[in-house]
Image (cartoon, rainbow, N blue to C red):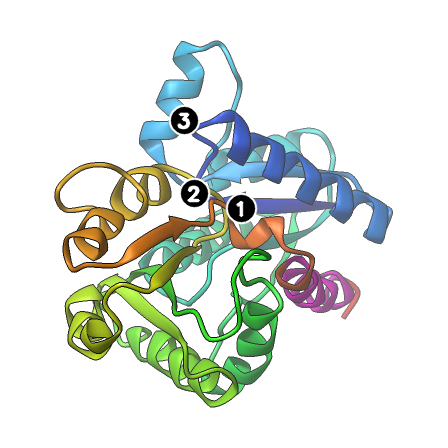
């Protein structure tokens, strides 16, 4: 029996996110004493890495490669936040690889599997807030969002966070609670400092452009236009030890299930 771990992320499009994923890989290998490697779900990022002569695999290709290398048992853990479209695609690839035979595969759950996970995710978020934030300063946390039923999980997360700190808001780029929803709530506090924090596993285009960029549609620009002093914290969730621990707990269940 040869066991291993496949970690899954959208991809690493810059040096900062690549460093984050390297640290997560090292943490995983040390904790479980098993070889760990990455698969990226973004076709675009994999193509970009190929042009830079850097190897990367999709989930299905990575699992096929591990089968070729004589792995027999592989635990798959993605850094997705919710069971949305991308997480479903990971499950599809795992099912395809398993149907091809010779691999025993298990999959760890995302950060928020259901509403019951919202409270621990809320506590992790409060431990991940900007270190320079003063008590009472608003923090707007930007998530990607989804059009699937799982979008309700972001709302559950936001509600759990608000119970712990009503000055921390969870909003999505697409979904029911967006920046447009928050601006009327924040209007009375114009002139104060507002912090922006990405609810994304690593820092990429959404963080650097859609959240903290200088373009007219970025959240930072829109908040500044509304009269706020805006500061952006450019750390992904995987940079924080509390969120890394939550993903490790989910992976621990997947590794244990390999022997079931």
Q: Residues within 10 Å of mark 3 (few under 14, many from 20)?
A: many
Q: Which residue is mark 1?
A: 8
The residue at 40%/49% (across/down) is: 232
- In the rendered image, the vertical position of residue 217 relative to residue 160, given as above or below: above
Q: Earlier in the sequence, mark 3 or mark 2?
A: 2
What is the total number of numbered labels drawn onto the structure image?
Answer: 3
Residue 46 numbered mark, or none: 3
- In the rendered image, the vertical position of residue 223 relative to residue 8, given as above or below: below
Alpha-carbon distance for marks 1 and 2? 7 Å
Q: Quadrant of residue 34?
A: top right
Q: Residues within 10 Å of mark 2 (few under 14, many from 20)?
A: many
The residue at 27%/49% (across/down) is: 220
Magenta-colored segment: predominant secondary structure: helix
Residue 21: x, y in percent?
60, 38
Q: In which quadrant of the rendered image does the C terminus lie? A: bottom right
Nearest the viewer among 234 and 94 is 234
The residue at 50%/33% (across/down) is: 61
């Amino acid at each position: 029996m040869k066991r291993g771990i496949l970690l899954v992320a959208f991809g690493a499009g810059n040096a900062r996110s690549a460093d984050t994923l390297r640290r997560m890989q090292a943490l995983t290998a040390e904790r479980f004493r098993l070889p760990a490697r990455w698969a990226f779900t973004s076709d675009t990022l994999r193509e970009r890495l190929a042009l830079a002569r850097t190897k990367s695999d999709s989930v299905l290709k990575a699992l096929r490669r591990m089968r070729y290398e004589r792995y027999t048992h592989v635990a798959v853990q993605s850094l997705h936040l919710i069971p949305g479209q991308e997480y479903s695609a990971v499950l599809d690839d795992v099912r395809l690889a398993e149907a091809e035979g010779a691999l025993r595969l298990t999959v760890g759950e995302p950060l928020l599997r259901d509403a019951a996970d919202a409270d621990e995710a809320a506590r992790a978020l409060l431990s991940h807030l900007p270190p320079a934030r003063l008590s009472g300063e608003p923090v707007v946390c930007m998530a990607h969002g989804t059009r699937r039923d799982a979008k309700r999980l972001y709302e559950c997360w936001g509600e759990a966070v608000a119970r712990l700190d009503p000055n921390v808001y969870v909003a999505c780029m697409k979904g029911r609670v967006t920046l447009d929803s928050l601006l009327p709530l924040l209007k009375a506090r114009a002139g104060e400092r507002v912090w922006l924090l990405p609810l994304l596993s690593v820092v990429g285009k959404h963080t650097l452009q859609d959240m903290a960029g200088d373009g007219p549609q970025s959240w930072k620009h829109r908040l500044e236009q509304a009269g706020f002093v805006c500061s952006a914290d450019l750390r992904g969730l995987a940079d924080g030890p509390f969120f890394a621990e939550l993903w490790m707990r989910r992976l621990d269940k997947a590794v244990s299930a390999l022997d079931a």
